[in-house]
Each structure stands twice: as C-alpha cells, then as structure tokens.
Image (cartoon, grey):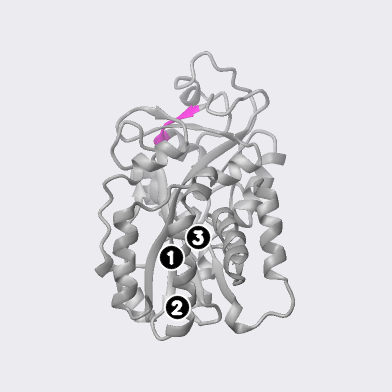
C-alpha cells in the first residue's frame, strides 16, 4: 500500500462514526513517526476493530496535550528529561527509530549527489553561506555543478521533535551553532522560512527553488525530495537508509529508570547516519485503563509491525529493547 493511501486510511479511521470510548485511542504529537503510526493503526483496526485517532501536530503539542491529559498518549521525538517526567507524572518509552535528512531543491541535482559536512551545513543554516556555489560547498563537491543562486533555508515553524533532533546534531558538530542558536523543539532561526510539520517543510522544499530543509526520511521518499549525503563522525559520507539508521541505533544504552532518555545524533560507526533519533510515547501515570489500551496497540505493533516499519524506512526496536519496555509496562501496572 502506498504511503498516501495509508494516510487516507487513517483519516477514514479517525473520522468514522459510531465510536465509543472503548474502541478508540486518542493520541497527538510528533509528525516524525506519523507514516508508520498510520500504517500500524490501519492494520490494528482491521485486526481488532479498535481505532487510533492520532493528531500529527508536532512534538511540542504532543507533550502539552498529555501534560493536560486531553489525549490518551502524547508522542515526542525529543525525549522528556527524567526530572520533567517525574514533575508531570508521566512515563515514557521509545516506539520506533528513524532518521532526519537535509533535503535540497537544486535543478538537476540527484539524491545523494550533494555532499555536506556538519560544519558547512550549520554555516548554511546560520546564513553565513548564502550561495550554492560558495567555495566552502564547492571544495566538498568537486565535479558537481553548483548554481550561482541564493540559498533559501526552510525550517519548522512549530515546536518539533524533528527540529530537536536536527538542532541537537548541529549543536554537537558546530560550536558556532551551539553558541548562536542552540538546540530544542523551537529555536530562533537566523534565516529562512517556516513550515508547519514535516509535511509543511516537505511542501516548501518541493516548491521553493534553491532551497534546503530537513524532514524525516519517509517524507523525503514520499515527496521524492533530493536528500543530501552527510559526513558522519567516522569521516565517511553516507546516504540516509534503513541500514544507516540501524547502524546509528546499534549499541545504544537504554535505561528504563530514566524513562529511556537518549539521543542518537553523531554516534560512531563507519555506516552510521549522523542525524538519527527515536520517537517516544508519553503516558500519564494515573490513567491505568487508558494506558492499557495504548500499550495493547504498541505491543501488537511491536509483535506484527516490523515489516511495515522497514518498508517505510524506519528501524524497528531490537527484541531486547522491546522486552525491556514490556517489563517497564508491567512495573507500571499497565501490561
């Protein structure tokens, strides 16, 4: 099934009539995992008759809604710190792993043809490199035709876990970026135009000539955007791919006692994609009945959804991590 059809299927599920509280799960948050949650929701509905209404509103909105207890679960690509989980009476666990990719709209440029390192990428986004044929880009791309054209930066306008992952990477690889902009779900972008959600950035990047933006890889694929090849921590230029995201996630040290709080940016490995991240689910500790419904959905997805995730270029959680999460659920009385 094509990604577009999956999206339409979720819309149908979310707007079906004759729903009761028992056969509906309400969630909101990150746009990063929306394609895979959509696909899982469609398959779960066919298997169980239980519907998922997931509002793809950005990680900031997801955290706000679960904090206010207006949904059964929130979703965020920026993990909530252990101290804040305690303060808001939340529990947190990862659900899927994917990658954020820079994308460009340069006439004649093919996916992976343009190469950038972290420092050069950060200077573009700071506005310090403003033309595509700048010598600092050209020296990395010998033999590639670069236009004498102004660069338009496209970024998120909403509070976004995708932005948190992306800016965490930039702050890690660039001292300038760390000092001038920093990292987080929302930052003060020095230049550029804003789009809402991964969808908004993808649409702008597709329409605006000579632009550069960043989206979750499934959106780049769905919209046929031209992704950039990046230099990783080990010095190799790599393409975004299932294997590169899996390499980035390999060996990650997850700690349930800290709500699995972990970032996956700029990790070592010859084949690692440098801007990977997990998407996290947030539950209110006191909402036992609602939490059990949510956990049933994700447990079912962990058992049956790996092939679907891989088709959409997400990395399913390893079995050891899934088993750890099930123990975590049990410890919290919801499994």
- The spot of residue 95 in percent (x, y) is 43, 60
- Secondary structure beneath dot 2 equals helix
Q: Do tag 2 and tag 3 residues touch (Cβ < 8 Å)?
A: no
Front position among marks 1 and 2: 1
Q: Earlier in the sequence, mark 1 or mark 2?
A: 2
- Residue denoted by label 2: 291
Circle 1 packing at 10 Å, graded few (<14), some (14-19), many (20+), is some
- Secondary structure beneath dot 3 equals loop
Q: Is 190 situated left or right of 5 in this image?
A: left
Residue 174 in view (yes/no) = no
- Residue denoted by label 3: 186
Q: Is 229 situated left or right of 271 in this image?
A: right
Cα–Cα span, label 3 and label 1: 31 Å
Front position among marks 2 and 3: 2
- Residue denoted by label 1: 299
Magenta part of the chain: 115-119
Instruction: Report if residue 57 lies within the magenta region.
Output: no
């Amino acid at each position: 099934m094509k990604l577009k059809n999956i999206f339409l299927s979720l819309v149908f599920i979310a707007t079906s009539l004759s729903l009761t509280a028992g056969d509906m799960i309400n969630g909101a948050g990150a746009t990063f995992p929306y394609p895979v949650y959509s696909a899982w929701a469609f398959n779960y509905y066919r298997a169980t008759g239980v519907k998922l209404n997931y509002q793809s509103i950005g990680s900031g909105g997801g955290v706000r809604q679960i904090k206010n207890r207006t949904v059964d679960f929130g979703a965020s690509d920026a993990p909530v710190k252990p101290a804040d989980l305690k303060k808001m009476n939340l529990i947190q666990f990862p659900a899927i792993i994917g990658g954020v990719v820079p994308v460009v709209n340069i006439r004649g440029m093919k996916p992976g043809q343009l190469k950038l390192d972290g420092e050069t990428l950060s200077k573009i986004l700071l506005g310090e490199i403003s033309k595509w044929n700048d010598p600092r880009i050209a020296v990395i791309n010998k033999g590639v035709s670069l236009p004498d054209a102004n660069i338009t930066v496209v970024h998120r306008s909403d509070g976004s876990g995708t932005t948190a992952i992306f800016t965490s990477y930039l702050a890690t690889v660039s001292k300038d970026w760390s000092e001038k902009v920093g990292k987080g779900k929302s930052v003060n972008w020095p230049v550029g135009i804003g789009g809402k959600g991964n969808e908004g950035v993808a649409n702008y990047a597709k329409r605006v000539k000579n632009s550069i933006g960043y989206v979750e890889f499934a959106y780049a694929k769905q919209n046929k955007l031209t992704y950039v090849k990046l230099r990783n921590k080990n010095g190799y230029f790599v393409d975004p791919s299932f294997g590169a995201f899996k390499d980035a996630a390999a060996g990650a040290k997850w700690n349930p006692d800290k709500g699995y709080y972990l970032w996956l940016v700029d990790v070592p490995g010859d084949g690692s994609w440098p801007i990977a991240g997990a998407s996290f689910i947030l539950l209110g500790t006191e909402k036992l009945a609602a939490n059990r419904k949510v956990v049933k959905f994700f447990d079912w997805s962990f058992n049956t959804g790996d092939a679907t995730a891989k088709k959409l270029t997400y990395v399913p959680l390893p079995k050891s991590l899934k088993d750890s999460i099930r123990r975590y659920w049990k410890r919290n009385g919801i499994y």
